[in-house]
Structure formats: C-alpha cells, structure tokens
Image (cartoon, grey):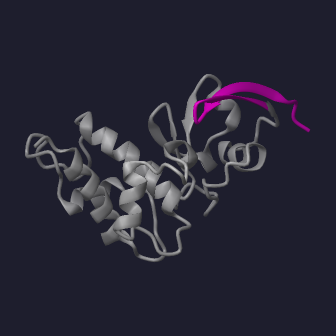
Amino acid sequence: MSENCAARLTVNGSPEDFLGDPRRSLLDFLRLDLKLTGTKKGCDHGQCGACTVLVNGQRINSCLSLAVMHDGDEITTIEGLGPASALSELQRAFVTHDGFQCGYCTPGQICSAKAMLDELAAGWPSAVTKDLTSGPIPSDEELSERMSGNLCRCGAYPNIIDAIRAVMQAEEPA
C-alpha cells in the first residue's frame, strides 16, 4: 500500500486539499472526491479528451495526470467555466449551434475550445498554421486540427467548429 501524499490545489477558484494515494488521477480526485462530475471518464488512456480540464490555463487530459502533481496549480473544470445558471459565451454557443448530440464529450470539448481560443489569442501556431498574420479567424481545417485531441463519437464536429467560430467572430473588433 502506498503512503498518502498531500497537495493543495485551487479548483474553480476554491482551495482544495488532496490527501490520498499518490496514484490517484486528477480526474478521479475531481469526480470522486470533489463531486465535480462534469468532467467525464471516457477511455481512461488519454485518447478521447472527454476528461479535458485546464491547469493554469493549459488543457490537459486529467486521466493521465496524478492529483498530487498539481500542488499549487489552478484547475478549471467545466463547472468553473460557467454554472448552468450563468453559462459562459462558449457554453452558450455550443447550445445555440448544437455542438453536441449525446453530450458526453461536451465538457472536454468546451474546456479544450476555451484553451484553444486562448492559444490563438497568444499567437501559438498549430501543425497546419500557414501564416500567423493571415487573419484573426483560422480555417475550419486549422480549428479542427487544434481540437483533434477531443473525439466526438456522435460526429458533431461541424457544429462544434460553428460554435467556436461564432465565439471568435463575436470577439472580433468592429
């Protein structure tokens, strides 16, 4: 049996203490200990993106990360982006553009899209970026590539891209 380890994390703005098995994933800590069940366990192998959360603003697969590794980190889950009573602009866009069908992947898709929009704003290139100065809104191909770590078994990809594009267009200066 492993000895318990301790870490202090900030989750959706609230300080949270982890005291437990050092082998416990961040995903299981969020879901089982903190009861933040918006983040989903899909493949549990880092291949589907259903468990995507933001750690210090960067998207990660929480199933592949140990909770104890995040001492001092700020974690944002889908619940932290906006509660049901006050959805974020991105969450509202997913609803408006039907960016989901069964909805299982949606929390990870939205968290990933939030980080991707921040990456674009910071000028980070992707594998298919042709020109960083070509314009504020990249092509559908580039948006799809940037979201490629998040799978949707239902095939809602065009609507997910439409939702992301709508948020980007709303943010464009007039």
Inspect the magenta stretch and tell me whether residue 5 lies in it.
yes
Identify the residue at image location x=15%, y=45%.
136
Inspect the magenta stretch and tell me whether residue 124 lies in it.
no
Q: 92 or 162: nearer the eye?
A: 92
Identify the residue at image location x=42%, y=48%.
88
Instruction: Please state the horizontal and vertical placement of residue 16, each as a whole percent of the image.
Output: 71, 30
* Residue 124 seen anywhere in this rendered image of the structure: no
Query: In the drawing, does residue 125 fall left or right of residue 155?
Result: left
* Residue 143 seen anywhere in this rendered image of the structure: yes
Looking at the rendered image, the quarter that the C terminus falls into is top left
Q: Which residues are magenta?
A: 1-18
Identify the residue at image location x=17%, y=50%.
137
Query: In the drawing, does residue 38 fall left or right of residue 88?
Result: right
Instruction: Please state the horizontal and vertical placement of residue 82, each as a whole percent of the image.
Output: 50, 46
In the displayed structure, 20 sits above or below 95; it is: above
Looking at this view, name the residue that lies furthest to the front: 85
